[in-house]
Amino acid sequence: MISPPAATARGALIVLEGCEDGTTALQSTKLLEFLKNEGIKARLWKFPDTTTPSGTALKAYRSSNRQPHPKTLHLLVAAHWWELMPIMKEHLINGTTLIVDKYVYSSIAASASAGLDLNWCKASYVHLLCPDLIFFLNVERESNEVVDQQSQPPQSTQLPHVNDVLGNNSNENLDESRRASEWQKRLQDAFARLAEVQWKVIVIINF
């Protein structure tokens, strides 16, 4: 009797989250290379995918330098993730492991950092694909940087620019540096409220 062909094992959904720009991108690329060297079928997934309708809308906001209302941007980003779900699911079913450089947790944290209610933000992603493994890259800053920030007078909370939420900071002038630093702090606070027990926290020392 001929045995039926073995079913293809589904791929794993591995997510890398973190506040610092470039950190998750670097580690995601390294993880992809490692898995491929181990003979594992893997693919790197970055957000947003501007080839889809909702991704095109996000790209339009970015290129036009428009500043949408935080709820508008949140719902558009959520719609984009929902649009990507069938595509991601198909890859996983076909045995491809997906390494996601910032998943919906970054989107939720960004919206919460913009002043939206955290639970309201989370509700947009109920029943999305649940990752098999989540790495949170926690970058520790230099001590002198922390002291310098503590010596500064407090600033009023400002809403982020659309490029901040999409992870496309331009850093065109020095004034942007402090705004970006404040934004990173708010993101860190939001992630602290989002983190769950199963998250694997990796501390990266930034000298």
Image (tube, helix red, strand yellow):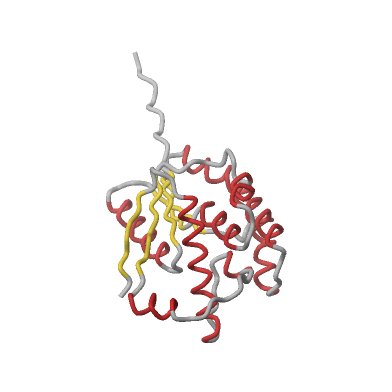
Q: Nearer the viewer, residue 1 or 115?
A: 115
| Residue at 38 percent of width and 52 percent of height | 135
**Nearer to me, 4 or 46:** 46
Q: How many marks?
A: 0
Q: Left or right? Give the position of 103 relative to 16.
A: right
Q: Quadrant of residue 30?
A: bottom left
Residue 112 position, x and y percent, is 59, 57
In the rendered structure, the answer to whether residue 77 lies left or right of residue 35 reads right
Q: Can you say whether 161 is above or below 16 in the image?
A: below
Q: Nearer the viewer, residue 7 or 57?
A: 57
Kindly identify the residue that appears in the image at 60 percent across and 47 percent down: 119
Determine which quarter of the picture holds residue 26.
bottom left
Residue toward you, 120 or 22: 120
In this view, which residue lies farthest toward the bottom? 174
**Residue 56: horizontal and vertical position, in percent?**
67, 61
Q: Position of residue 61 (x, y in %)?
A: 69, 68
> Could you tell me which quadrant the N terminus lies in?
top left
Q: Residue at x 57, y 38 (%)?
A: 127
The residue positioned farthest toward the top in the image shown: 1
- Residue pictured at 39% horizontal, 75% vertical: 146
- The x and y percentages for residue 182 are 52, 72
* Image quadrant in which the C terminus is located: bottom left
Residue 198: quarter of image: top left
In the rendered structure, the answer to whether residue 31 lies left or right of residue 15 reads: left
